Image (cartoon, grey):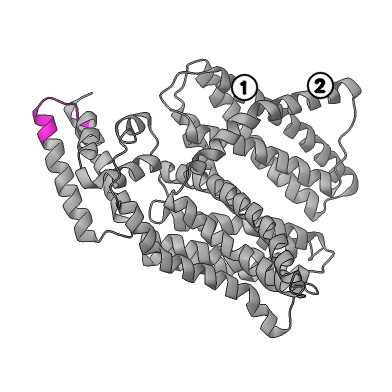
Amino acid sequence: MSPTDEQQGLETQFAQWRSYVRHRPELRQSDAEELEDHLRDSVDELLGVGLRADEAFLVAVKRMGGLDELSREFAREHSERLWKQLVLSADTDGPETGTARGRRHDLLPVALCAAGAAVSIKVPALFGLDLEHDAAFYARNLALFALPWLAALLAWRRRAAPPVVGALVALFALGAVAANVYPLAEDSQSIVLTGIHLPIALWFVVGLAYVADEVRAARRRMDFVRFTGEWVVYMALIGIGGGLLIPFVFGIFKAIGIVPEAFVVHWLLPCGGVAAVVVAGWLVEAKQSVVENMAPVLARLFTPLIAAVLLAFLVTVGWTSAGIDLEREALILFDVLLAVVLGLLLYSISARDPLAPPSVFDKLQLVLVVCALAIDVLVLVEITGRISEYGTTPNKAAALGENVILLANLAWSARLLLDFVRRRTPFARLEQWQTGYLPVYAAWAWIVALVFPPLFDYL
């Protein structure tokens, strides 16, 4: 590598560090500038004794004394092999680390955002709406009660620029339009599609708050993928805890002759559910548990199981020549199945050492993707045949579009995995492809939520 290339690489690392530090809520801009000056001086000193630029940068970060915890957080956000080896190896937390102070600094905003979500879901009751008689309204708007508050918390933590904040407000307002303006009957297909696709579209708006002003950065997009998986794990754990809490509440109040059913149904469940969305996001950000590594672990556990199931399904289809039933429930099931395969691939990528050589697990992933690709082709053929014979419906059109989008992703992923297994392309190409494809999912979710209802006459 030439001196110019080394210098460019070093400046890229400085830019990455600078961006990370400036988005830490506990640090002012002057603090960030002082940290960078200190880091640059240390790097220059190490370069002077003969270290390469990348080695000097990593060692300088490691040497930052009281900033060890901040350095470890930076390493967790950027999971390349050298970061984990040189930064995460230390375990010298003092009695009060920067992260601990940051968590306390977050408590008031977290409490306000969680309370805001809880209040939001009760506001419709002021206008005569309730969960029992207006379930369709709450189903369409559920994401709008919680996700704007999570996005607000993330935007505050990232110190998002005003244009980003403006974009967040505009997109959530657009989501409110999609949920409430169209005249959708409770038994229409469009209301079901909106209920499925609008939360997906709004989750990508949360992603915008997460990446803030680094929208084009592939690593930040992959960080958001990790955040999503960890958030799901925390939500599941909170849900399990809530499931244990409710019988306890019933039991202790029943002992004094009070049945708290109305409180649980109308207050505890809805308010606690939307507040949990915010709290789970904060827990992921705070990195308070090794559960943050659970999503990749689950991906490794279920990849061989799902691959075996898909392979068995394909063999059975070929053996029996049975057609695929594509009623609405089946369409949703196959789309969920393909999304699960994609999730397994993404979380395996997120936890993988990009410099490691191909392994047996990579070959197993290739089998999984190829099986999913074959099933996707079968479903597409069936959908196309049904549309040609009976005409299109919102469900079939949405399923067709989603399967085409997944087909393109899986096909190119299979190609990249095959080239990687054959040592013809670096693993980073697969990660770049997946993070670059994320906006396609967001765009399609918005199209289904906004365009499909009027396109199909609100059917």
Residue 311: image x %, image y %?
75, 24
In-image side of 164 versus 38 (left or right): right
User: Badge 1, how many Cα within 10 Å: few under 14, some, many 20+?
Assistant: some
In-image side of 43 versus 324 (left or right): left
Residue at the location (17% across, 28% down)? 3
Residue 297 visible: yes
Q: Is residue 51 on the magenta stretch?
A: yes
Residue 223: image x %, image y %?
45, 44
What quarter of the picture does the N terminus occupy?
top left
**Which corner quadrant of the image does residue 202 belong to?**
bottom right
Which residue, as the protein is rendered here, is positioned at the far bottom? 127
> In the rendered structure, which disc, 1 or 2, sits on the residue that comes first in sequence?
2
Q: Is residue 296 above or below residue 455?
A: above
The amino acid marked with disc number 2 is Val
Residue 419: image x %, image y %?
52, 20
Query: Which residue is labeled 2 in the image?
Result: 315
Residue 32: image x %, image y %?
22, 54
Residue 160 visible: no
Q: Start and end of the magenta stretch?
A: 45-53
Residue at the location (81% across, 40% down)? 384
* Front-most of residues 269 and 20: 269
Residue at the location (63% across, 63% down)? 273
Question: Which mark, by number, is residue 364?
Answer: 1
Q: Is residue 389 on the magenta stretch?
A: no
Q: CA distance from mark 1 to mark 2?
A: 17 Å
The amino acid marked with disc number 1 is Leu
Which residue, as the protein is rendered here, is positioned at the far top? 422
